[in-house]
């Protein structure tokens, strides 16, 4: 079956712009999470959605937001981009309660210039 | 969420068995132990998960002592392609994964 698909794979944006990243989870997976990975901070949790509801949020400013659609696809948005937002953004999905094995996508590499 | 401690890096040679130990002194009763593998510019890949004693799958074994305050990921006969970062995670839920710094494993010929 298809894995977690993230688009686009690479993105270059200018400071002050906004960006939207997309994630299609594995079919049947209802929970989608987003993570930011940077060399300095490592892998950090952004937020998690289940059935279109945000259930958990990491310690990121309000410029970072997300949503989940009825088909479980998810998007995350970063507004007013800063240089420090340059990172690999990873999406992960899991079937639901009782299944702890997340499947991650290959990520979107965002570069802010 | 229990904090985990792993060695920052490990070196090995092809064909050897590699054991990576993770310390999690504050593990809670309902917490599971999960290991992920990550290659550069890719998302982490689930390797194995366990609650107690020993778990084995086609790629690795996970050893958990009775007190559950540590765990050991065992990779049998590593190859060059096992060079990656390995993360140990501890938690009960699936809503949020807390990654530590991981262990960077380098396998040499």
Image (cartoon, helix red, strand yellow):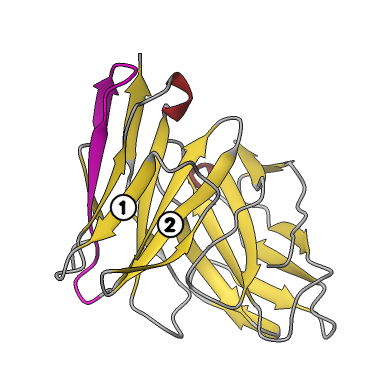
Quadrant of image for the C terminus of chain A: top left
Dividing the picture into quadrants, the one containing residue B65 is bottom right
Which residue in the structure is indicated by mark 2? Answer: A47
Q: Position of residue B90 (x, y in %)?
A: 65, 69
Which residue is at a point 25% across and 42% down the rendered structure image?
A: A21
In this rendering, is residue A80 above or below B39?
above
Residue segment shown in magenta = A9-28
For this rendering, which residue is in front, A28 or B87? A28
Q: Position of residue A14 (x, y in %)?
A: 29, 16
Asked if residue A9 can be seen in this view, the reply is: no
What's the chain of the residue with tag 1? Answer: A
Q: Position of residue B6 (x, y in %)?
A: 75, 52
Which residue in the structure is indicated by mark 1? Answer: A66
Quadrant of image for the N terminus of chain A: bottom left
Mark 1: few/some/many CA within 10 Å (<14, 14-19, 20+) = many
For this rendering, which residue is in front, B4 or A30? A30
For this rendering, which residue is in front, A81 or A92? A81
Q: Secondary structure at mark 1?
A: strand
What's the chain of the residue with tag 2? Answer: A
Q: Secondary structure at mark 2?
A: strand
In this rendering, is residue B12 above or below B87?
above
């Amino acid at each position: 079956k298809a894995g977690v698909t993230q688009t686009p794979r690479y993105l270059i944006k200018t400071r002050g712009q906004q960006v939207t990243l997309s994630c299609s989870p594995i079919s049947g997976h209802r929970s989608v999470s987003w993570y930011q990975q940077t060399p300095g901070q490592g892998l950090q949790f952004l937020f998690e959605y289940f059935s279109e509801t945000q259930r958990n949020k990491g310690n990121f400013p309000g410029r970072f937001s997300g949503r989940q659609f009825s088909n479980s696809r998810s998007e995350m948005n970063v507004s007013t981009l800063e240089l420090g937002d340059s990172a690999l953004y990873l999406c992960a999905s899991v079937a639901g309660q009782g299944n702890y094995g997340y499947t991650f996508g290959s990520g979107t590499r965002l570069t802010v210039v | 969420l229990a904090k985990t401690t792993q060695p920052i890096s490990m070196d090995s040679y092809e064909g050897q068995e590699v054991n990576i130990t993770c310390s999690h002194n504050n593990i809670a009763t309902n917490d599971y132990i999960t290991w992920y593998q990550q290659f550069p510019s890719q998302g982490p890949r689930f390797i194995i998960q366990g609650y107690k004693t020993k778990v084995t799958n086609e790629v690795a074994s996970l050893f958990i002592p009775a007190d559950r305050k540590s765990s050991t990921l065992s990779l049998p006969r590593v190859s060059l392609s096992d060079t990656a970062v390995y993360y140990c995670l501890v938690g009960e839920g699936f809503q949020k994964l807390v990654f530590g710094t991981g262990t960077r494993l380098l396998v040499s010929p």
